[in-house]
Amino acid sequence: MSEVIKALNGLLSWELTSIDQYTSHSEQYADWGFQKLYERINHEAEDERGHAKLLIERILFLGGRPDLESRHALPDADTVPEMLAADLQLERENAAALRKAIQLCEQQRDFVSRNVLVGILQDTEEDHAYWLEQQLGLIHRLSLERYLQAMM
């Protein structure tokens, strides 16, 4: 189980990084007057908090100690498209780590942890990443100016 705990702590670092990044981006959007972007990205931060809670609970159940200090580097993004693209990249990297951890859980026959991770992966791919891809597509199709008008 120590390998699973290590993998879960690795995933926790992605979730904590996501919370930090989404919180920073949502507050920038609010400061710039993009209320719709603020609301959605702030909601994403809350989703990530829920994912982190699930991981912490599972780590504790398995007898491990949650690593609440480790983070990945935050991107240097200064515009809405850069921020959305950075968020999408974060989700893709998190999804890749989730897939690897799911495989490990299957090998270790820890199907409860596997099921928790599958739920997080589904949320990551079908909600977070999909929405971010849509927004970048809208910017491309509508123009940045029209997109930003719609986000006010």
Image (cartoon, rainbow, N blue to C red):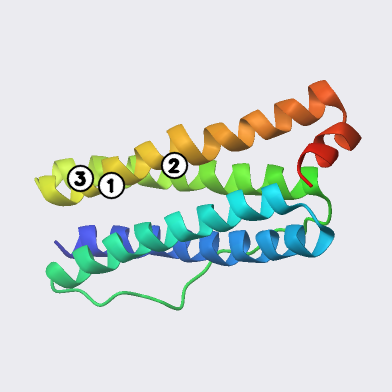
Along the line of sight, which residue is nearer the eye, 86 or 48?
48
Q: Identify which residue is drawn at 65% across, 63% down.
A: 74
Mark 2 neighbour density, 10 Å: few (under 14) some (14–19) many (20 or more):
many
Q: Identify which residue is drawn at 28% across, 40% down.
A: 118
The residue pinned by badge 2 equals 124
Q: CA distance from mark 2 to mark 1?
A: 10 Å
Q: CA distance from mark 2 to mark 3?
A: 15 Å
Residue that extends furthest to the left in the rendered view of this protein: 109
Q: Position of residue 113 (x, y in %)?
A: 18, 51
Q: Give the residue type that dot 2 points to.
A: Thr
Q: Give the residue type that dot 3 points to.
A: Arg
Q: Look at the numbered discs 2 and 3 and tell me whether their residues touch, using CB distance below 8 Å.
A: no
Q: If you read the primary sequence from the N terminus, does the residue marked by circle 2 or circle 1 appear first? A: 1
Q: If you read the primary sequence from the N terminus, does the residue marked by circle 2 or circle 3 appear first? A: 3
Mark 1 neighbour density, 10 Å: few (under 14) some (14–19) many (20 or more):
many
The residue pinned by badge 1 equals 117
Q: Position of residue 56 (x, y in %)?
A: 28, 68
Element class at badge 3: helix
Element class at badge 2: helix
Q: Look at the numbered discs 3 and 1 and tell me whether their residues touch, using CB distance below 8 Å.
A: yes
The residue pinned by badge 3 equals 114
Q: Give the residue type that dot 1 points to.
A: Leu
